[in-house]
Image (tube, rainbow, N blue to C red):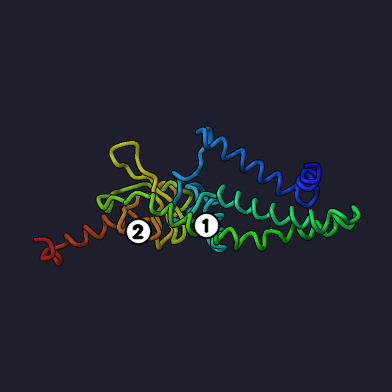
Amino acid sequence: MQEFLTVVFGYPTLPYSVVLSVALVYWGLAAFGLVDDGFGDLGADGALDGGTDLHGLSALLQRFGLGGVPVMVVVTLLALFGWVLTYFVHLYLLLPLPDLLRWSIGTGVALLAPLPAVPLTALLLRPIRRFLLRLRPVPQASLLGRIGVVASPRVDARSGHATVDDGGAGLVLQVRSDIELQRGERIVLVEHVAEQHYYRVVRAEAVALDFQDNLLPGNKENHP
C-alpha cells in the first residue's frame, strides 16, 4: 500500500492523479444532479452548446476522433489512460532511479503519455458515441421553415447555434450556414442534416425577398 501511494502521489504520476481525481469528483456530483453531466447539451459536433471557444474545442476534438461525447468524458478517459501509463512506468522503471534522473525521465514520460492515450480514448469512444446517437430524439420535420434567431457569436459552415420558438420554452439548435451570420440575425430552417444533427439555415430576409420575387407579374404563373 505504501508503494502504491508513493507512486500515485509521486512524479510523474501525480499530475494525472490530480486530473483523474477531479474528474471522478465531477462525475460523483453529476450522479447526484449537482452539476450538469453534459449529455443533454450535445450538439451536432459533440460539443456543448456555447460560444466560439467551445466550438473551437469541439473542432479540435473531432480532428483527433474524440468528438461526439461531452468534453468531460474525453478528459476523464485521457486522464485515466495517462494515469495508467505513468503509474506503471513510474512503478517498474523510475522508482529505483535517483531523484534527479527520475524527474528528468519522468517529465518526458508525462509529456509523451497523451500520445498513446489519445488513440486509446478515440477507440473506446466509438461504441459510446454510437450509443449516444441512438438516445438522441428524432427531430421534428415540422421545424423546417421555422424562423429563429442566431444565439452564438456567429454561424458559419462549421459551427453555430440558434434559438427557435416552438410555442414552449424554446429550442436551442445546432445550425450551419454557407454565409456567415451574426448574433441576433433572424434565420429560417431550410434543411435538417440528420446524420450530424444540425439544421442548414438562411437569412429570413433572403427568404422574404425570394418570395416577393416569385410574386412579380412575370412569375405569377408559378403561383396560381
In the structure shown, which secondary structural element does the residue marked by tag 1 occupy? Answer: helix
Instruction: Pick whichever of labels 1 and 2 is earlier in the sequence.
Output: 1
Q: Quadrant of the N terminus?
A: top right
Q: Is residue 37 left or right of residue 135?
A: right
Compared across the picture, whether 73 is left or right of 130 comes to right
Residue occupying the point 38% across, 56% down: 198
The answer to which of 153 and 139 lies nearer the viewer is 139
Report x, y in % for residue 175.
Answer: 40, 54
Q: Quadrant of the C terminus?
A: bottom left
- Marker disc for residue 125: 1
Question: Mark 2: which amino acid?
Answer: Ala
Check the image and report above or below for 62 versus 27. Answer: below
Residue visible at 60% across and 52% down in the picture: 77
Amino acid at circle 1: Leu
Residue 42 left/right relative to 115: left
Which of the two marks, 1 or 2, is nearer to us in this view? 1
Q: Which residue is mark 2?
A: 194
Image: 60 above or below 148: below
- Give percent across and percent down for residue 16: 71, 49
User: Which residue does the image show at 34% across and 40% down from the upper left?
Assistant: 170
In this picture, residue 222 sits left or right of residue 103? left
Above or below, comparing residue 32 to residue 130 in the picture: above
SS for dot 2: loop
Q: Residues within 10 Å of mark 1 (few under 14, many from 20)?
A: many
Q: Residue at x 31, y 59 (%)?
A: 191
Residue 107 pos. (x, y %): 80, 57
Question: Which residue lies most toward the left here?
Answer: 224
